[in-house]
Amino acid sequence: DGFTAEKLFNQGFSYTYDDVIFLPHYIDFPADAVNLSTNLTRRIPLSVPFVASPMDTVSESSMAAAMASLGAIAVVHSNTSPSNQASILRAVKSRRVPILSDPVFCSPSFVVEHDDAFANSPFLLITDTGTARGKLLGYVAKSDWTNRNDKGCQVKEYMSGPPVAVPWSAELSEIEKVMESKKEGAVALMRDEELVDVVSKEEVKRVRGYPKLVGPGSVGPDGEWMVGAAIGTREDDKERLEHLVKAGVNVVVLDSSQGNSSYQLEMIKYVKKVYPELDVIGGNVVTMYQAENLIQAGVDGLRVGMGSGSICTTQEVCAVGRGQASAVYKVSSIAYKSGVPVIADGGISNSGHIVKALSLGASTVMMGSFLAGSLEAPGAYEYQNGQRVKKYRGMGSLEAMTKGSDARYLGEKAKLKIAQGVVGAVKDKGSVLNFIPYTLQAVRQGFQDIGANSLQSAHDLLRSRVLRMEVRTGAAQIEGGVHGLVSYEKKYY
Ligand code: XMP
């Protein structure tokens, strides 16, 4: 009944996730028994098969800390200076909690004149020098200032004493214990006598309200959160890579929309030679031929997708790309023979797409828009037509390229810039710490329906031709969505 993937994807059509539907199989285990642990690359295991895209409206320090705490990972974008990209990595790797503020420092004689002073951080941290390097004397929370009648006095008059210090590696439960036993509203995370951050009781309470995280998160051999970083393939990217390696990067992604190039092949060989301990992800690719070249050059992971991203215009502008279901299946069918995990990048807009990507051979899914608009995504919330939104933009959009990301789309500094992406906004989604656990549960239910109790078992079903599927006609796609109602509200949890 139905078609095997082999038959379906060899008919000359480019299929995307929505075109394809799996036929259910046989269930003999509960959904909770589905194990989604996987490998990002040859040597990097993950307990959750999700990766945050290297985009400047998705992956910076807050996203990376949250993804690592969930057992997933983020790849920090390179649309910033090498030293700033490295300091984003350091911020992530200097804590074991999914909480990150951007501390603001001031001197004891500072006078707060406006609540703008708290715009980027819930606290002002008072040090003797007024900078991060000074001795921590105390802190002022926004409410300490707003509740005062006399707002014109110096912060030293009303600051709380220096918060109790805990080591940088303290986990949420340890921090909670210290707060309770010492009756503290905040603790200072310290590493080698330096202040990493201040964690407030409200923030701990917020995170505690989300579904319980299981497992220790994604911790690398150094005992720190794992985090990836994107680089390009130009000569100066070698210097960028050196900064990132010093900051402890766990995996590097060669960020290109067409990865099968002499520049990338050379860069893969360079990374493998100079940093043999570092896993390198190549891409993007969508064909078996492209994949083969990168595998031969020594990649440890392959990023798959061209033009399927929600903000992409590559297929329209350049006439190249592939439907994402076809691309993932085709590349996976060759990559697995060399033990190279595939990352299905782009085009994920619901949990069903994730089930399809993973069952068609991918080991992880990389997501941009699915994670954008979250609390952890960079940027501030704005209002558009009464809706709370955050900006989400393609790295090939003109706006992002003027900041430097043109290397990904143009290869080198081109005279005439043509955009391959757009700038938009996505709805406020709340914290990834809240919606990722629900998404994972939905994915487990999909796996249960096809009779796969693990990612490995899904791949076995695919290759042993047990997994059957069909193409949905236009009418079948309409039938598969909500239809025929005057109004409804879509709520998944
Ligand atoms: P989603 O669908 O998750 O896609 O939002 C994220 C992926 O899209 C790619 N990307 C782009 N592709 N023009 C493109 O053609 C762009 O401006 C652009 N920016 C990001 C990238 O692979 C990302 O992971």
Image (cartoon, rainbow, N blue to C red):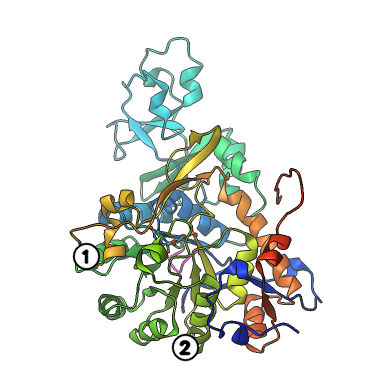
Does residue 413 appear to the left or right of 401 in the view shown? left
Can residue 20 be seen here?
yes
The answer to whether the beta carbon of the residue marked 2 is less than 8 Å from any atom of ligand 1 is: no
SS under mark 1: loop
Is most of the magenta stretch helix, strand or loop?
loop
Q: Does the magenta stretch include residue 222?
A: yes
Q: How many labels does the image show?
A: 2
Q: Is residue 191 above or below residue 4?
A: above
Q: Is residue 191 above or below residue 333?
A: above
Write the start and end of the magenta stretch as one range: 219-223
Picture quarter with the N terminus: bottom right
| Residue 169 seen in this snapshot | no
Against 14, residue 382 (above or below) is above
- Residue lying at 29% horizontally and 31% vertically, measured from the top left: 130
Residue named by callout 2: 338
Q: Which residue is at 37% across, 13% downward? A: 153
Q: On the picture, is 404 further left or further right than 258?
A: left
- Residue toward you, 136 or 493: 493
In depth, the one of 120 and 427 nearer the eye is 427
- Residue type marked 1: Glu
- Residue 320 screen position, x and y as percent: 39, 71
The front one of 140 and 418 is 418
| Cα–Cα gap, marks 2 and 1 | 31 Å
Label 1, residues with CA under 10 Å away: few <14, some 14-19, many ≥20: few
Camera-nearest residue between 77 and 312: 312
Q: Quadrant of residue 442?
A: bottom right
Extreme top residue here?
149
Q: Give x and y (percent) for residue 24.
A: 76, 75
Q: Is mark 2 on a helix, strand or loop?
A: helix
The residue at which mark 1 appears reads as: 412
Query: Which badge, 2 or 1, comes first in the chain's sequence?
Result: 2
Question: Which amino acid type corresponds to the residue marked 2 in the rendered image?
Answer: Ser
